[in-house]
Structures are given as structure tokens and as C-alpha cells.
Image: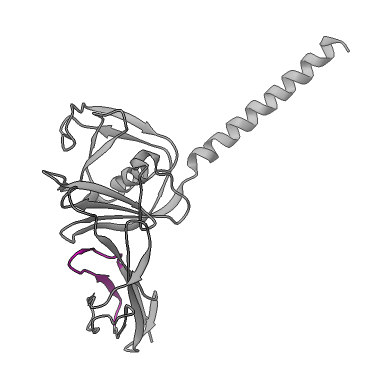
Amino acid sequence: MSHRILAPALNLALGLSLLLALLAGPAAAASKVPATVRVVTWEGKVLLDKAVKSGSVTVKTSEQADCLGGSPTNGRQSIPGTTALGILQQASKKYEQVRPLLLSNAFDFGLGLCGVGDAVAGGEQWWVLKLNHADSTAGGEGTVLKKNDVVLWYLAESYLQPTPSELYLKAPAKVKRQKSTRVRVLAFDSAGKKKPVEGASIRNSNAEPTNANGYTRVKLNRKTKLIVRKSGFITSNRVVVKVKK
């Protein structure tokens, strides 16, 4: 077959491929994965508990991020895909309480997190990363997220102590006004294994402490943010419960 016939066909194919790539590129770049981001300190302070959409990001490193030692420098680094550190960066653009991020580039193993907003690790404190209630060992850049994952960044009091179990509050999104409604408190250990929590109190309610199976009942007359704090545990998720007639 003549090359004069093949050349136009190849050029057409290449042109179509290029056009498709250009059309697909923005769509792919715009694709973001939704996940929940929680930032909690060992003192029980909740800096963030929000759903955030994120994809590839660029972060800044700082010479002031010296919580891990080494010699961090001021710089910028791209993080491709949707990751635990990337979604934290995305959240910091939207929510003032989690900015600035203080990141270190002092080591080959990847970026290190020193501070989120006014929560900055000092002394033996360090940031623990959990994905879907279990400890992540991949680091912030290597922890890849899927749709509706839950990411927890927890500022622990000391790396010399075991990480506390994470409280989890299970409650309905809507209840009837002043109707007794059952809720439950669970705790997830570092491996993500759950068990009921006895004696936990539901904040912003007059509920009795939870029983041996983790259950108690609440009565609400208005929209309420419920949360659980208990000594020796990581503070729970916040559940916004709406009230209907």
C-alpha cells in the first residue's frame, strides 16, 4: 500500500488522539474525591470535622517545621492523586482553623507534618494518621483516598505512649422533637477493630452515660451537634442531628 495513503490516515488518527486527550485532560484534572477530614488534638480540641473534595495539590514546606529534627527548607512540592496530606491541604484553603500547615521536607521518607493551624507538635508530641479508623503506615503522601473515606489527623501527646482508641458516635441525622432516640458509642483501636464503650457521655444532651453495649437515649428539641469526649480516648466525630415535628 502506498505511504501517501497511510500518511493522511495516521495524521488523522494522531489528530483525533490529541483532540481526545485535550478534551479529557481538564475533566480528569477537575475530578476530585470526596472524603471526611477530621483534625483532633490530645486535649480533645476538634479543629475540623468536614467533608472535603480533593485531588492533586501543591504544598509549601517551611524551614520552621523543625518538630521532627533535620534541616527543613522553604519550598514547594506537588502531591499527585487524592491523598491524606493532599486533602488536608485542600481543607486548609477553605477552613481558616486548619491553616497554615507546617510541613517538613527534611527527610527522604517524605513530607512530615508539624502543625495544623495553632496545633503545632512540640517535645514528644506527634501527628498520628488514621484512615477509616485504623492507623495508616503509608504516610500522608502515600495514603491514597477513595470516595467517602474518613481521614483523621490526631496530635498525640507523646510518641512514647500507645495511641488511644478513637471514639465513634452513631446517631441518626434526623429525630422527632423530644422523642427518645437510641444512639451508640463505639471505640476503634489502632487496627480498626471496634468495641462498645460504657460510661461515655454525649455532649450537648441530657442523655445518661452509655451502657455496657455502648447505647444510650437522647431527647432533642432543636438542631444539635452531638459529640463524645472521654478520658483516655480520641474525641469522637461530630454528628449534626436535625429535629423534625
Q: Which residue is rendered at x = 41% and y = 54% of the image?
A: 35
Q: Which residue is rendered at x = 29% and y = 82% of the image?
A: 211
Q: Which residue is rendered at x = 24% and y = 64% of the image?
A: 235
Provide the residue span drawn in magenta: 222-238
| Front residue (pair 82, 98) | 82
| Front residue (pair 107, 181) | 107
Task: Give the quarter of the image for residue 14.
Answer: top right
Q: Is residue 226 above or below residue 158?
A: below
Quadrant in which the C terminus is drawn: bottom left
Q: Can you name the residue that lies furthest to the right here?
A: 1
Q: How many marks?
A: 0
Task: Give the quarter of the image for residue 184.
Answer: bottom left
Measured from the top left, where is residue 36 in percent x and y? 37, 56
Measured from the top left, where is residue 16 in percent x and y? 69, 28
Measured from the top left, where is residue 30 in percent x and y? 49, 42
Using the rendered image of the protein, determine whether residue 214 is visible from the camera's viewpoint: yes
Q: Can you name the residue that lies furthest to the left here?
A: 123
- Left or right of 144, for residue 106: left
Using the rendered image of the protein, determine whether residue 101 is visible from the camera's viewpoint: no
Q: Which residue is rendered at x = 43% and y = 55% of the image?
A: 149
**Residue 228: in magenta span:** yes
